[in-house]
Image (cartoon, rainbow, N blue to C red):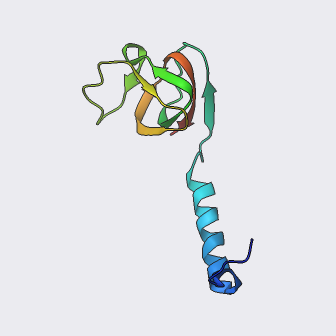
Amino acid sequence: MANSPSGLNSDPKFKMMIDVLRDTMIQGYAKQGATFINDTAQHTAGYYAIQGISAAKLDVSDCVFGSGMTDFDADFTIPNGAIIYGNFNTLSLESGSCIAYKK
């Protein structure tokens, strides 16, 4: 770790907090795995987040949404790098590619 102008990184408590934060992020994100999707097939593993990789256009008519997701009646594009969160039981793309994070 580079030296901080504030000198914080020399404090053992600071290092411990950074380590805890890093471990928490690693454990919570994609803990169940992820799937790279670049086709138009239905993917049924169940997902909680979708990250756009190459203009991922979600084919809403071919998707099955879980509880709490209503009025999704138009296809939409997830911009590159953007992440949307939801309850996706079945996921299908019209075009592009994405990383889908499993529930």
Residue drawn at 56 percent across, 19 percent down: 96
Q: Name the foreground residue: 31 vs 77.
A: 77
Residue drawn at 62 percent across, 31 percent down: 35
Q: Name the foreground residue: 52 vs 28.
A: 52
Q: Provide residue 89's location: percent of width, then percent of height.
A: 44, 28
Q: Is residue 74 above or below residue 27?
A: above
Label total for image: 0
Residue drawn at 53 percent across, 15 percent down: 95
Q: Quadrant of residue 54?
A: top right
Q: Is residue 62 left or right of residue 41?
A: left
Q: Is residue 27 above or below residue 17?
A: above
Q: Provide residue 80's location: percent of width, then percent of height.
A: 54, 32
Q: Provide residue 43's location: percent of width, then percent of height.
A: 54, 21
Q: Is residue 87 above or below residue 30?
A: above
**Quadrant where the N terminus lies?**
bottom right
Q: Is residue 43 above or below residue 88?
A: above
Residue drawn at 49 percent across, 38 percent down: 82
Q: Quadrant of residue 17?
A: bottom right
> Looking at this rendering, what residue extends furthest in the left direction?
71
Q: Name the foreground residue: 18 vs 65.
A: 18
Q: Is residue 56 left or right of residue 86?
A: right
Q: Is residue 49 left or right of residue 33?
A: left
Q: Name the foreground residue: 11 vs 24.
A: 11
